[in-house]
Amino acid sequence: MVWCTKLPNIPVYNNSEMLGRYYEEFKINRKTGESNLTEIYLMEGLDFILRQTKARRPFFLYWAPDATHAPVYASKRFLGKSQRGRYGDAVMELDYSIGQILSWLQTLGIDNNTFVFFTSDNGAALISAPNEGGSNGPFLCGKQTTFEGGMREPAIAWWPGHIKEGTVSFQLANVMDLFTTSLALAGVSPPNDRTLDGLDLTPVLLNRSHTLQNRPIFYYRGNELMAVRLGQYKAHYWTWSNSWEEFKKGINFCPGQEIPDVTTHEQKEHTMQPIIFHLGRDPGEKFPISVLSKEYHDVLSRISPVVEQHKKTLVPGAPQLNMCDVAVMNWAPAGCEKLGKCLKVPKSEPWKCDWPH
Amino acid sequence: MVWCTKLPNIPVYNNSEMLGRYYEEFKINRKTGESNLTEIYLMEGLDFILRQTKARRPFFLYWAPDATHAPVYASKRFLGKSQRGRYGDAVMELDYSIGQILSWLQTLGIDNNTFVFFTSDNGAALISAPNEGGSNGPFLCGKQTTFEGGMREPAIAWWPGHIKEGTVSFQLANVMDLFTTSLALAGVSPPNDRTLDGLDLTPVLLNRSHTLQNRPIFYYRGNELMAVRLGQYKAHYWTWSNSWEEFKKGINFCPGQEIPDVTTHEQKEHTMQPIIFHLGRDPGEKFPISVLSKEYHDVLSRISPVVEQHKKTLVPGAPQLNMCDVAVMNWAPAGCEKLGKCLKVPKSEPWKCDWPH
């Protein structure tokens, strides 16, 4: 894949207006890791909640700090405070900030009326580990792969008086469910002109004994169905960590983890005979179940029709990642002129590019 | 190392009398994994506690079930109950049994007067994983190595009314401390004719703010000091997972984990330039700190005098693992004659053998 070397620094918005540019106006001291950006986000969040509450308006807040993404940063008061270096300091500030938000909801007396859901979009990026990235514990590889280290995330749901505290659920879910669940919580019917992949999780969240037991999870990279999870089993139809080209340059998505035939550096097809793991007894995807075993055949005979059904009913969206154009970037977003921060937009030169992730 | 092929099955004792032989009289169904051995141990433990309590005798109970060691087993009621296969079932029964012991102490009204400590002697044996072994999460390798997966263990201390529930301590400790700690709890002075390596942990256990901050941990295999931990840093003076000979036969102490120069298959010396990890930001021992960095030199200058002092003051015990003799085995233990279970003791033929673990 060709990529241009010079890209505009990412703008920071307030609604649709550009406020400045990330790590130019919103400073990160790359040497010490100091930045008060998470603090700014926290203040914005608390202020938004306050304004909505005063106006007695129901609200939806998507609070997405990026402090644990490289370059990792934290406010001065958290730097050097964790046992986990700069990454730990960032997590500590994130944890503190969530605590502030929850306590703010309690102070305003709207905690029994506010559903809070906390999760991450992907596992730790091991190419940034250990100084600027997290750990995926026993799970294989990290961000940008469809192994458990890239995809499996815990989540916390909080709603005093509705969700019993300390309850643990083994329900499999994915971020697409949040749309459907949010609609259900708001009492809104989902659109019926399309098929929604997300399920309504409220029965599970509000009733600890309820489970959506047989819901499969599909793992994609780009348009390719890489793997499927059903219950405790996961079948890999394609394997790939990263390219030999990247790998030879020292970029490693699975440092210290090499599973023969699994963490492959070419996109390897196994559709005729998927590699199957039991994630209960082998969460690290290290011990493929023998294709000669009864267990393998039993599992495959349950997973195959699920995959077939999925492929038959899936309506592919228009691919959004098969054309590249350096002009389509954040060169001159709305508001940049007020700040004198508009950059010269290069000539539009779209080219066909493949984004096989 | 030479080893004989035929060894007696391990005897099970009650005090010094043999009761029978492990998995001959104390059956393990190797196909289903069913055995009531943990149940028998539990009943023995509960009965012992009851008898001591009725006689108003203080007691020390060392309750060491082996159900999570291969061959893994569980009682019928736990088989197939966990999400983690047979190993999980064994852990579930272990957890249940500990619960029974704690609740028994409460029932007898001696819980405020009984100190309970729970831990393991080593990390999961990955050669038995996943069906008959645990997982060491993010930690490197497993049992039989001096990497964190072999040596690092959590522990739980329980003493209602004395230890605050839910408290988490980051204190580094090791099993040698339990002797010294037990003496302190019993109000007995330690023997003063020798140096004890274990420290008294009671200040840490009873006062959550107290720490024994700079206590080093020494990692041995046989007589060889393999590594030293000081605070968050660990320096490897020797590295070794297992031998090439074993490894080529398919025995792997670190399946799916290969760290160049670290998980070596020869006993590799690094005493002139130890490999140093920061376990806080790199608990998996995957990213050696650069020997060219200031951090490396600062840490080494703190660890080196600790190692020097340790080597200077250490009084080596007589090695107990450098002679082998098949006659010195559990062929005819006390009580075997009553059971008709004495085996013919082979001729004593001691030979010099090396046990480099």
Image (spheres, coloured by chain):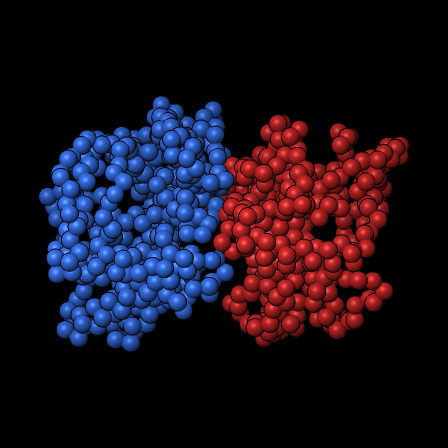
Chain colours: A red, B blue
The x, y position of residue B237, in whole percent, is 35, 30
Relative to B212, is A283 on the left or the right?
A: right
**Looking at the image, how many numbered discs can be counted on the residues?**
0
Q: Nearer the viewer, residue A256 or A56?
A: A256
Q: Nearer the viewer, residue A215 or B3?
A: B3
The x, y position of residue B242, in whole percent, is 38, 34
Q: Quadrant of residue B169?
A: bottom left
The x, y position of residue B111, in whole percent, is 28, 70
- Say which residue appears at 78% left-offset and 71% top-offset: A188
The x, y position of residue B244, in whole percent, is 40, 30
Q: Is residue B118 visible?
A: no
Q: Quadrant of residue A295?
A: bottom right
Relative to B73, is A207 on the left or the right?
A: right
Q: Quadrant of the N terminus of chain B?
A: top left
Q: Is residue A266 visible?
A: yes
- Say which residue appears at 36% left-offset and 53% top-offset: B71
Q: Quadrant of residue B22?
A: bottom left
Q: Nearer the viewer, residue A357 or A293?
A: A293
Q: Quadrant of the C terminus of chain B?
A: top left
Residue B245's place in the image compared with A143, above or below, is: above
- Say which residue appears at 76% left-offset and 54% top-offset: A311
